[in-house]
């Protein structure tokens, strides 16, 4: 059987995604109750980071430790990937020594090339194109608080970035309506929008996007690697801040999510993260549980 990877949400069927989330909820209960689940002793997770992260490293490393395995942190300084070795060569060597690999990088083409030559499962822990692990955590969080997201209205407010792209894929895989509000010049991938035009609507007005929404989501206006664009982006995204006023246009029981880190006074106001409608902290924690379920799924294929 061919090795399976998780590079985008489209790599799994809707049924498989639901299975992973249900298992994540179960693993969360087990962890809270301190029920041992040492399923992969002597297994090794290779963690390749070209982009730094707090939540990604802690969640994957802690999660694999819960399974009884060992997580190995690799930065570009630690490997030949950062010194020009062909990706295919690194993939063949690294995958011969570990049991599963997660990669957090810039170019999506890098992770696709690595997976092509890997003999073990590869997980996309973020690229400039998509962030599928975060979407699994977001979907788990919504289900825990409100039940199925099928048929609901979700609103994305802000940059048409990797998170926005993953929400477009999620709209298809989890069967919800997606409203996207982005300023001109910061729109999501046009081909992706066109391929999902039956359930995705693109507008410039955040209020129009948020009306009657069940879930409102945003992200930083300047992602890692875009620091030199920060001033221009702050100007372009004026009026796209999520705050109480904007949330008032959503449904009364609407939730708010943000993948973090968050910048108060920019994409959100000072109080948004701790507002009654915010589930950001549950969302962050769920990265741990849903990635454990994902790794378990891939290792048991």
Image (cartoon, rainbow, N blue to C red):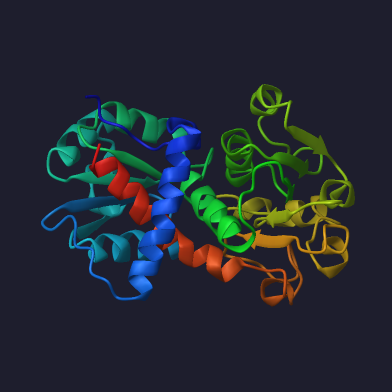
Instruction: Name the quadrant of the N terminus.
Output: top left
Q: Is residue 118 left or right of residue 211?
A: left
Which of 229/63 is in front?
63
Tell me residue 99's x, y (percent). 18, 45
Q: Is residue 192 visible?
A: yes
Q: How many numbered dots are placed on residues in this image?
A: 0
Instruction: Please say if 247 is above or below 2.
Output: below
Q: Residue at x 89, y 47 (%)?
A: 208
Q: Residue at x 88, y 52 (%)?
A: 207
Tell me residue 41's x, y (percent). 13, 58
Which of 233/239 is in front?
239
Tell me residue 126's x, y (percent). 46, 46
Tell me residue 61's x, y (percent). 30, 62
Q: Which image quadrant for residue 36? A: bottom left
Q: Is residue 106 visible?
A: no
Which of 200/18 is in front?
18
Instruction: Name the quadrant of the C terminus.
Output: top left
Instruction: Please say if 243 is above or below 170.
Output: below
Q: Residue at x 78, y 34 (%)?
A: 201
Q: Is residue 72 left or right of residue 168?
A: left
Q: Residue at x 73, y 26 (%)?
A: 197
Q: Which image quadrant for residue 129? A: top right
């Amino acid at each position: 059987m061919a090795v399976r990877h998780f590079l985008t949400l489209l790599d799994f069927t809707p049924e498989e995604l639901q299975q992973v989330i249900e298992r994540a909820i179960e693993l969360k209960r087990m962890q809270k109750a301190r029920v041992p689940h040492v399923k992969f002793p002597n297994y090794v997770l290779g963690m390749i980071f070209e982009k730094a992260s707090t939540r990604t490293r802690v969640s994957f490393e802690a999660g694999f430790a819960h399974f009884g395995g060992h997580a190995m942190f690799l930065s570009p300084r630690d490997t030949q990937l950062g010194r020009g070795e062909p990706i295919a060569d690194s993939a063949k060597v690294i995958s011969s020594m570990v049991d599963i690999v997660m990669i957090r990088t810039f170019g999506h083409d890098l992770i696709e090339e690595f997976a092509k030559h890997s003999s073990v499962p590869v997980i996309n822990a973020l690229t400039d194109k998509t962030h599928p692990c975060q979407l699994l955590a977001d979907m788990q969080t919504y289900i825990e608080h409100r039940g199925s997201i099928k048929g609901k209205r979700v609103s994305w407010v802000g940059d048409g970035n990797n998170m926005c792209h993953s929400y477009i894929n999620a709209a298809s895989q989890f069967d919800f309506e997606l409203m996207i509000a982005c300023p001109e010049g910061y729109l999501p991938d046009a081909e992706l929008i066109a391929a999902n035009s039956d359930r995705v609507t693109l507008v410039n007005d955040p209020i129009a996007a948020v009306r009657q929404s069940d879930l409102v989501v945003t992200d930083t206006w300047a992602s890692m690697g875009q620091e030199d664009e920060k001033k221009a982006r702050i100007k372009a995204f004026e009026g796209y801040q999520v705050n109480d006023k904007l949330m008032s246009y959503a449904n009364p029981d609407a939730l708010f999510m943000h993948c973090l880190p968050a910048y108060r006074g920019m994409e959100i106001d000072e109080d948004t993260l701790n507002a009654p409608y915010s589930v950001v902290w549950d969302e962050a924690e769920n990265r741990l549980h849903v990635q454990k379920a994902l790794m378990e799924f891939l290792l048991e294929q």
